[in-house]
Image: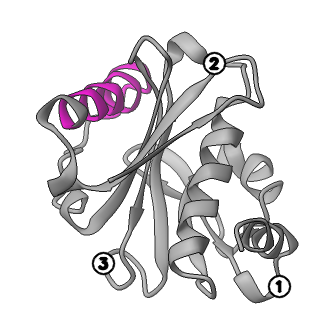
């Protein structure tokens, strides 16, 4: 397990990056509760969130100084969902929206991913309404919109070899 702090923004987040088996029961409960709160309740999307993929993923949890989980994503191993690595279940707490946490979360996730896999491509299934957000991070749309769990999505790919952000993140961590 790897933890660190980020103080460049108004809210300090302590990051935890770990495989499922290295997380405590409280961490797992917190991220499952947050995912359910947003994906199932807020977005009125009935689906099986515990999809078996969490065991084949790295989990990034961002907590404030009080220990509240405000941001979360998972990095799924290559060849589980796609041939490439994939990032999914990207989420910020409804109590901490409009503070730039989504971008900070993705930047932290990409940084840690590229530290482990410096030449990796990363595929996502993005909600179509968030295409511009992911494009700002270097992802490029790879599909027409399709429905997933009742919400329009598109596949997007961050190609390391052609992406300045990925190269910049990698250079900062050498």
Please name the residue that numbered disc 2 is placed on: 97
Mark linked to residue 162: 1
Helix, strand or loop status at disc 3 = loop
- The quarter of the image holding the C terminus is bottom right
Categorize mark 3 by other alpha carbons within 10 Å: few (<14), some (14-19), many (20+).
few
Q: In this rendering, does residue 86 appear at all?
A: yes
Circle 2: is it few (<14), some (14-19), or many (20+) Cα within 10 Å? Answer: few
Q: Is residue 123 at all visible to an observer of this figure?
A: no
Picture quadrant of residue 150: top left
**Structural crowding at the residue carrying mark 1, measured as other residues with C-alpha within 10 Å and reported as few (<14), some (14–19) or many (≥20):** few
Residue occupying the point 73% across, 66% down: 139
Left or right, residue 104 beside residue 74: right
Marks 1 and 2, the one that precedes in the sequence: 2
Q: Give the vertical position of 73 relative to 5 (above or below).
A: below
Mark 3 or mark 2: whose residue is earlier in sequence = 3
Return the residue at label 3.
Answer: 80
């Amino acid at each position: 397990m790897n933890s660190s702090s980020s103080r460049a923004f108004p809210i300090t987040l302590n990051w935890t990056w770990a495989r499922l088996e290295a997380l405590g029961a409280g961490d797992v409960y917190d991220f499952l509760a947050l995912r359910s709160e947003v994906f199932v309740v807020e977005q009125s999307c009935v689906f099986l969130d515990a999809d078996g993929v969490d065991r084949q993923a790295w989990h990034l949890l961002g907590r404030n100084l009080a220990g509240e989980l405000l941001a979360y994503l998972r990095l799924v191993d290559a060849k589980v969902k796609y041939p490439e690595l994939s990032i999914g279940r990207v989420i910020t707490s409804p109590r901490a929206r409009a503070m730039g946490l989504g971008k900070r979360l993705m930047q932290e996730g990409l940084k840690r991913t590229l530290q482990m896999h410096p030449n990796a491509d990363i595929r996502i299934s993005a909600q179509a309404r968030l295409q511009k957000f992911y494009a700002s991070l270097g992802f490029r749309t790879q599909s027409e919109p399709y429905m997933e769990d009742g919400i329009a999505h598109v596949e997007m790919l961050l190609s390391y070899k052609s992406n300045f952000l990925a190269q910049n993140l990698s250079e900062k961590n050498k």
